[in-house]
Image (cartoon, rainbow, N blue to C red):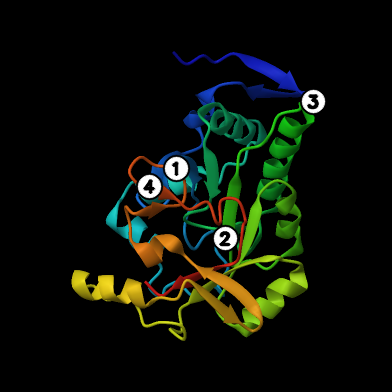
């Protein structure tokens, strides 16, 4: 049974149990991520930098919004950034023993610039939980926004700069990023995954486990390399749990797929 009991944390009234669902929309994993995480998404485009190489160019998140009518409104609901409800959502992840994947769709922007209110509310929520002696869940995100203010969040979660080329990498390094997700959109590492199942299986087998780009090592995403249902990001019955990005264990390469 769900309750709506409230308590005060540093002067702010926050919800102790999942009443946060009335405002925030969070999914319980998916086929790629597995069921061991909560997934927070925001509207695609509205929260993404216009410089994103995927935006309007085969972005799977854009396609998801078009195919499933309820997806975009759910993401729009997460433009609300009430810090107490963010805190309660994180506490619920802790209670369930789940990690949190921030922004499977969308990013940290709003109206063409960093949504500082949102960033600050997430940071406040993390800080308030840690101040009570609790351990935060594993949390991670990828971003096309190379801003040092996002790097500061690595205190509480694993922060990956999504990059497509050496220029992106240089900009991310300059901003202070330490973890990188190389998106092989130019197909320099491998051709795009074929649609035919037999050809796709052969394509996976041809992918390298590890690549070195500009003196930096990247592990090829195990879920892409081994196949959906075989590997998931988080623990799920019947699959191998990767945890590479979840725990920030290494840089990751995403072949074009």
The numbered mark, 3 or 2, whose residue comes first in the sequence reads: 3
- Crowding at mark 4 (Cα within 10 Å: few <14, some 14-19, many 20+): some
Cα distance, mark 3 to mark 4? 35 Å
Front of the two marks 3 and 2: 2
Task: Evaluate if marks 4 and 2 touch, with contact meaning CB atoms under 8 Å apart.
Answer: no
| Residue 194 vertical position relative to residue 225 in the rendered view, above or below | below
Which residue sits at x=36%, y=78%?
206
Task: Evaluate if marks 3 and 1 touch, with contact meaning CB atoms under 8 Å apart.
Answer: no
Which residue sits at x=69%, y=49%?
119
Kindly identify which residue carries mark 4: 30
- Rendered-image quadrant of the C terminus: bottom left
Kindly identify which residue carries mark 2: 142
The numbered mark, 4 or 1, whose residue comes first in the sequence reads: 4
The numbered mark, 3 or 1, whose residue comes first in the sequence reads: 3
Return the x and y of residue 89 as percentages of the image width and height: 56, 33
Front of the two marks 3 and 1: 1
**SS class, disc 4:** strand
Q: Find residue 10 and name its label.
A: 3
Kindly identify which residue carries mark 1: 235
The numbered mark, 1 or 2, whose residue comes first in the sequence reads: 2
Task: Evaluate if marks 1 and 2 touch, with contact meaning CB atoms under 8 Å apart.
Answer: no
Front of the two marks 4 and 1: 1
Return the x and y of residue 246 as percentages of the image width and height: 56, 51
**SS class, disc 3:** loop
Cα distance, mark 3 to mark 1? 34 Å
Cα distance, mark 3 to mark 2? 31 Å
């Amino acid at each position: 049974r769900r309750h709506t009991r409230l308590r005060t944390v540093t002067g702010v009234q926050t919800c102790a149990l999942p009443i946060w669902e009335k405002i925030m929309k969070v999914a319980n994993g998916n086929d790629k991520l597995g069921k061991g995480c909560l997934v927070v998404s925001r509207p695609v485009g509205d929260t993404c930098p216009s410089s994103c190489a995927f935006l309007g160019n085969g972005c799977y998140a854009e396609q998801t919004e078009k195919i499933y009518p309820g997806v975009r409104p759910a993401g729009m609901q997460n433009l609300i950034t009430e810090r107490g409800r963010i805190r309660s959502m994180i506490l619920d992840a802790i209670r369930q023993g789940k990690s949190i994947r921030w922004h499977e769709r969308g990013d940290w922007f709003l109206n063409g610039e960093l949504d500082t209110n949102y960033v600050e509310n997430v940071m406040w929520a993390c800080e308030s939980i840690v101040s009570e002696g609790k351990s935060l869940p594993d949390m991670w995100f990828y971003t096309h926004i190379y801003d040092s203010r996002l790097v500061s969040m690595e205190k509480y979660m694993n922060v990956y700069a999504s990059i497509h080329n050496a220029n992106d990498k240089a900009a991310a390094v300059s901003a202070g990023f330490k973890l990188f997700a190389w998106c092989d959109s130019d197909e320099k590492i491998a051709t795009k995954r074929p649609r035919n199942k037999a050809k796709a299986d052969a394509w996976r087998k041809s992918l390298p486990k590890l690549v070195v780009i500009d003196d930096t090592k990247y592990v090829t995403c195990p879920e892409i390399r081994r196949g959906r249902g075989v590997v998931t990001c988080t623990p799920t019955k019947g699959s191998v749990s990767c945890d590479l990005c979840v725990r920030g264990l290494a840089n990751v390469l995403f072949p074009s797929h």
